[in-house]
Every structure is written in C-alpha cells, then in structure tokens.
Image: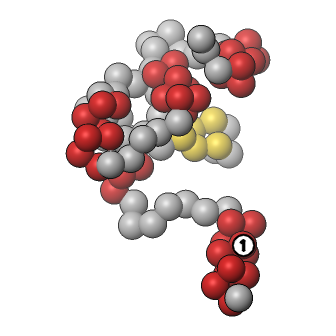
Amino acid sequence: MPHPAVVRLSELLPPPGSGGDAVDWERIERTTGLAFPADYRELVELYGGGESDEYLSVSTPPVPGSPYGDLLGRGEPALSDRDREAEAAAAAV
C-alpha cells in the first residue's frame, strides 16, 4: 500500500516520465546495515534522486548514472539546525 504522503506528493507534483531510480534495497541493507523507511524507498523509486527548484534535494544510495547517488558517501548525516541543537543539548547534560 503506497504511503499517503507519497500519493499526495504525486498528485501535486507528477513524477517524471522517465521514472525513478532502481535501487537494490536488499543489497544496500545487507552491505551497510542500514534499513531505509518505506516512504523514502517509494519516493526514490517514483521520482529518483534530484533537486526541486534549487530548494529541496533528494540524495539516494549509489545508482548507476545518477549524480544524486551520494547518500552513502557522506561523512556524516545531514542534520537540520534543530537536530544539531538537540544533539548539543543532550551532550551537555
């Protein structure tokens, strides 16, 4: 069953005609130990990695031919300012 947020997004912003990215999620999980949420997997499979209006960027695990397949190559996760503040507050306790 598709995730409601992905369904709503596809109503507002139709996915590209070329389709999304084919990711071997089982291999990624097996080799990295990371399990990605179902809604993220649906988003990547429907839209692929990319950027919207130079505002929102979606990175993916490595996908042949995709310039957005850099998710696993990052040194640390991308955190929002709120996440960084929460980490700093927790470390201070």
Above or below 57: residue 46: above
Residue 33: % across, % down: 32, 48
Q: Residue at x 51, y 19 (%)?
A: 46
Above or below 19: residue 85: below
Amino acid on which the number 1 mark rests in the picture: Ala
- Tell me, yes or no, if residue 81 can be seen here: no
Q: How many numbered marks does the figure carry?
A: 1
Above or below 30: residue 92: below
Observer-nearest of 9 and 54: 9
Q: Residue at x 55, y 60 (%)?
A: 78
Observer-nearest of 54 and 30: 30
Residue 5: % across, % down: 71, 24
The way the protein has been coloured in the rendering is secondary structure
Quadrant where the N terminus is found in the figure: top right
Q: Is residue 47 left or right of residue 13?
A: left
Q: What element carries label 1?
A: helix
- Tell me, yes or no, if residue 66 can be seen here: yes
Q: In this view, does 27 lie to the left or right of 50?
A: left
Q: Residue at x 47, y 39 (%)?
A: 36
Quadrant where the C terminus is found in the figure: bottom right
The image quarter containing residue 23 is top left
The image quarter containing residue 60 is top left
The image quarter containing residue 54 is top right
Q: Which residue is drawn at 65% across and 20% down?
A: 3
Label 1 Cα crowd, 10 Å radius (few <14 / some 14-19 / many 20+): few
Observer-nearest of 23 and 67: 23
Residue at the far bottom in the pictured view: 92
Residue 39: % across, % down: 58, 29
Residue 86: % across, % down: 72, 72
What residue would you read off at disc 1? Answer: 86
